[in-house]
Image (cartoon, helix red, strand yellow):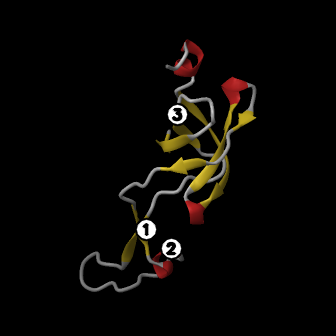
Amino acid sequence: MADITELKNLVRKGTVHNVDAGRLKARVKFGDKGGIISGELHILAHSGTVVPSAGERNGDRVGETQGHEHEAYLAPWIPQQGDLVLCIMVPDGDGEGYILGGIR
């Protein structure tokens, strides 16, 4: 059974220190815990974000016809270095945890 200290540390917020997008893992710095940096935390899969195509990002209209149409794609949400995120930690003392999402 988890002790009270583990329960207090179950949900944390922190700043992304670095990201391994290929493995969907990141390390998070917890300022309220003396600035400690977590081990690799799993980034939870989200439904994604609609992102404009490469030409659209550069200011060019790609695939535009009559009206407002352009190409886009669905990209997974991956936090960036410096983002504020909400984490949940497994209360077993091993430092395993998950990044639930970003905080705005």
Q: Residues within 10 Å of mark 3 (few under 14, many from 20)?
A: some
User: Which disc number belongs to residue 57?
Assistant: 2
Image spot of residue 90 (x, y percent): 52, 34
- At a point 35% along the width and 58% down the height, the residue shown is 47
- At a point 67% along the width and 24% down the height, the residue shown is 32
User: Which disc number belongs to residue 90?
Assistant: 3
Residue found farthest to the left? 66
Residue 68 lies in what quarter of the image?
Answer: bottom left
**Rounded to the nearest whole Å, what is the CA distance between mark 1 and mark 2?**
8 Å
Q: Amino acid at mark 1?
A: Val
Relative to residue 36, is residue 104 drawn left or right?
A: left
- At a point 60% along the width and 45% down the height, the residue shown is 83
Mark 3: which secondary structure? loop
Q: Is residue 13 above or below residue 8?
A: below
Relative to residue 99, is residue 38 drawn left or right?
A: right
Provide the residue designation for mark 1. Answer: 51
Relative to residue 8, is residue 15 drawn left or right?
A: right
- At a point 46% along the width and 77% down the height, the residue shown is 56
Mark 2: which secondary structure? helix
Image spot of residue 94 (x, y percent): 63, 35
Q: Amino acid at mark 3?
A: Val
Q: Amino acid at mark 2?
A: Arg
Image spot of residue 99 (x, y percent): 52, 44
Of tags 1 and 2, the one toward the viewer is 1
**Rounded to the nearest whole Å, what is the CA distance between mark 3 and mark 2?**
39 Å
